[in-house]
Amino acid sequence: MNDARPLLQIDGLSVAYGHVEAVKGLSLDVRAGEMVALVGANGAGKSTTLLALSGLVRPRSGSIRWEGQDITRWPAHRRVAGGLVQVPEGRAILKTLTVRENLELGAFPRGGRPDLGPVFERFPILRTRAAQLAGNLSGGEQQMLAIGRALLAEPRLLMLDEPSMGLAPLVAREIFAILREIHQQGMTVLLVEQNVRQALKLADRAYVLETGTVTLGGPAADLADDPRVIAAYLGG
Amino acid sequence: MFAQQIVNAISLGSVYALFALGFTLVFGILGVINLSHGGIFMVGAYAALLLLTRFEIPFWAALPLAMLAAGLLGLAIDLLILKQLRKRGAPHLMPMIATIGAAILMTSLSQGLFGSETRRFPLDLFDQESFSWGPVTIPVLQAGITALSVLLMLLMVWVLKRTRIGQALRAVAESPKAASLLGIPVERLFHLTSFVAAALGGAAGILIGLSFDAISPFMGQPMLHKGIAAIILGGLGDVRGAVLGGLFLGAAEVFAVTVLSSEYRDALSFGLLFLVLLWRPQGLFGASATRSA
């Protein structure tokens, strides 16, 4: 399933907010068809890495290559059009727009009126709520809307930042099941998740981030058995 | 008498609303208060005057051309001032100060180019006839001004509500970050908004110049105050609020003149603004919504 050449390759990425360096010389890659997890404690630089990948923060140094092309300086909208789509932390639902309008905007880079049918089939609740303001949805429904909206952009790499955050355990489990299904249908996924156990269960490979840099990387199953990971993140 | 005042109020209020609409679009979408909007309004009026008198272009062509000129000026202000401040992450006060500077520059340049005296659009521009409807008399010019203001406002509301670009603009208004993640070219929409808002401001300048039969380099400043009053009355950043705020302000002025006298016109309307803000700090029609990053 995996191509030899990485779809996404990050080399020596550093991002700073003022004098505080949030990401320090980070390198990683994602191959087509993989699900890769980024795990680590709060403040490890996971979200900043995703923001840099989406073009919302400017790296101080390093490079981001997408299908071999250097996209480090590309504006955010060009990256989305190129297939790098993110469901950010907090979901970024447009609360004053309806559910239908949110979904239609998901397809903005593709132009024209999108076919919402497949998203409604995957998330029937969104069809029921289509005319409601998105701000009135529950947390789980908002996460479904965010994922459905991202899928309408026709991503080739779907990045998700803490999709289970703020959700009841049962709803979080439902979201993870949806992610597994999307991945099994061939989607390449880069997942940032604080629930390390779940992330390692879902992903093919994973990277552990600490203070802005990769400290461990490898097959997710191996990392789940690594005593350092068990001690630090799995309550071993 | 009362019916006539209602007609006058709608006519004046609709031009205020048109001015306020451009003003509120910039606030709602770019998140800045562009204090050069009054200057753009004045430039729109002078551009039309120049096209009508110097180039002898008919009014139906001069209006869109003057709107285009005002729009391009708005775009230039965005590119040269607002974009530079955005790039540097300047605090909210900076665009206000910078656009005050732009407005002063426009006023001084107009004074230098056209002189300080009040100018008028050519007399033979419009039919001097009036429609009469019972006790109400509406001059053709006044009816045309109202119709054009209402048409431009309806067009804007339609674009914002019904089109793909309007949806994208509303997304940017709510959260530029979320809009970026959806692949919406936020910077381009900032430029488009600045252009359209300024074109609407320029149109309002032409219509006020026609309505009061006076154009001067200083006409922008009092209009800016009215625009601020209208959008605060209506609720900052809210399109319907700007329209209703403009109409409300127009009505307040017309009735102030009727009940008291014209000297008290601004005192009454701005006194009203103060009272409204004490009662509803978010404006008459606005929700106390905040914009996310």
Image (tube, coloured by chain):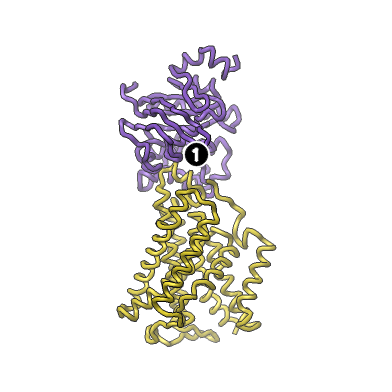
Chain colours: A purple, B yellow
Q: Amino acid at mark 1?
A: Leu
The residue nearer to you, when weighing A26 against A198, is A26
Give the left or right position of residue A94, taking residue A106 as reference. Answer: right
Residue sitting at x 52%, y 60%: B97
Query: Percent x, y for residue B276?
Result: 66, 65
The residue nearer to you, when weighing B109 against B120, is B109
Query: Percent x, y for residue B22?
Result: 47, 63
Residue sitting at x 49%, y 86%: B132
> Can residue B8 be seen from the camera position used here?
yes
Query: Percent x, y for residue A23?
Result: 48, 30
Up-down: is A86 above or below B241? Answer: above
Bin the neighbour count of mark 1 within 10 Å (Cα to Cα): few under 14, some 14-19, many 20 and up: many
* Residue denoted by label 1: A145
Look at the numbered disc 1 and give the secondary structure of its residue. helix
Give the left or right position of residue A26, taking residue B267 as reference. Answer: left
Residue sitting at x 51%, y 13%: A226
The residue nearer to you, when weighing A23 against B151, is A23
Given the image, what chain letter belongs to the residue carrying mark 1? A
Count the marks: how many?
Answer: 1
- Quarter of the image with the N terminus of chain B is bottom right
Up-down: is B96 above or below A91? Answer: below
Query: Percent x, y for residue B126?
Result: 39, 83
> Can residue A147 be seen from the camera position used here?
no
Residue sitting at x 43%, y 39%: A58
